[in-house]
Image (spheres, grey):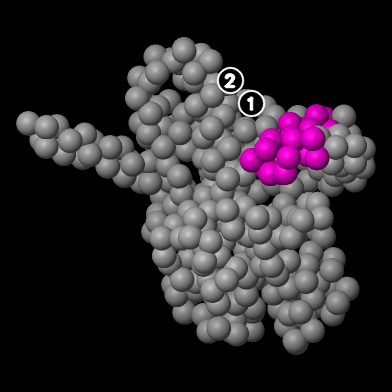
Amino acid sequence: MMNVGTPDEPTVRSVKKYLKQFLLDPDVIDIPAPLRHLLVRGIILNTRPKKVAPLYQKIWMEEGSPLRVYSDRVASSLGESLNGTKVEFAMRYGNPSIRYGLEALKQQGVEELLLLPMFPHYAQATTESSLKEAHKQLKEMNWSPKILEIHHFETDSEYITPLVNSIKPHINQETHLLFSYHGLPVSHVKRIDQSKSHCQKVEDCCSISCDANQLCYAHHCMKTTLEVVKSLNLEPDQWSLSFQSRLGPVKWLEPSTVDKVAQLVGSGVKKLAIVAPAFLVDGLETLEELEIGIRANFMELGGEELTVIKCLNDEQEWIDGLMKIIENRFQHSISSTNLSASSTT
């Protein structure tokens, strides 16, 4: 299991170390290396850690960073549910590292390895970067287990059903539901479109499934949203979609969550529920950015009631769903192997 990462401590020094590793990854900030280093080392690392460390301090749990705590709980629950299957979780940036997790599995005699980026929606900065790092470390370790991968599961019922059930208790006819996804630079989604004729060029491009956007993050977010909307029988005026957590001067996916909340209050929305489907476990983006920051904005603008719906975390229905997603991947692998053997025969 691989997630993005978190500082080891809620301190400026620890946050700076984490952000340095995170933001210098070319899969995250995809500009020429000299400019990336100038931006990150010369500007961001001299200013942002001082702003972010206090935010982590607000949400830090007794056991540590929420992202790490909840990830640990998911891994433990998953290991128990999978009847002895060895499960390790790792962070793409920070600790425990992907190398640490792989070494632990190797020492346990693992011969078949499933790489599971904990992101329902595919993106270069998350899924692809995590898988690349895992393969890099495997090569350095000179370890060659049989490898399976799960790339995305944005419409799998095993993910959608627990998500829908987590939302249901918090909405009624008076509630507007906002789907707030992690932001992404527009350049990342445009790069996926090899045709160069669909992304950001066709009206409602994210709502249309085609070869050009099979691995498009924004399209995956829209697919998840529409599946949930359908399951909840919501009318068009009962829900909205936005993107949060922007960083840097580049153009990002729109609308931003901050702007969307302001627009909703301006249009008369008094009761708002926010769900963040891109995050499988709670962390800074949900516990601080939404629960504290966006809540304050909503109330200041005249909103009356805001509910930030918790991530799936280690809820048993989601653990069961994740277990099924994993089992389906193994079964698909077995079927493909048998089919290949049969064809060869």
Residue shown at 16% from the left, 39% from the top: 339
Q: Can residue 229 be seen in this view?
A: yes
Would you say residue 312 sits in the magenta stretch?
no
Give coordinates of residue 231: x percent, y percent. 44, 72
Type of amino acid under label 1: Pro
Front residue of 17 and 101: 17
Q: Residues within 10 Å of mark 1 (few under 14, many from 20)?
A: some
Element at badge 1?
Answer: loop
Residue at numbered disc 1: 96
**Above-or-below relation of 227 to 187:** below
Give coordinates of residue 1: x percent, y percent. 51, 35
Q: Which residue lies furthest to the bottom in this view?
A: 268
Residue range corresponding to the magenta coloring: 14-36
The answer for how far apart the CA atoms under marks 2 and 1 are is 6 Å
Front residue of 81 and 51: 51
The reply, left or right, for residue 275 in relation to residue 319 is: right
Decide whether the magenta segment is chiefly helix, strand or loop: helix
Q: Quick check: marks 2 and 1 in contact, CB under 8 Å? A: yes
Q: Which residue lies furthest to the left in this view?
A: 345
Residue at numbered disc 2: 100
Residue shown at 67% from the left, 38% from the top: 26
Would you say residue 31 sits in the magenta stretch?
yes
Give coordinates of residue 324: x percent, y percent. 36, 46
Front residue of 124 and 286: 124
**Which corner quadrant holds the C terminus?**
top left
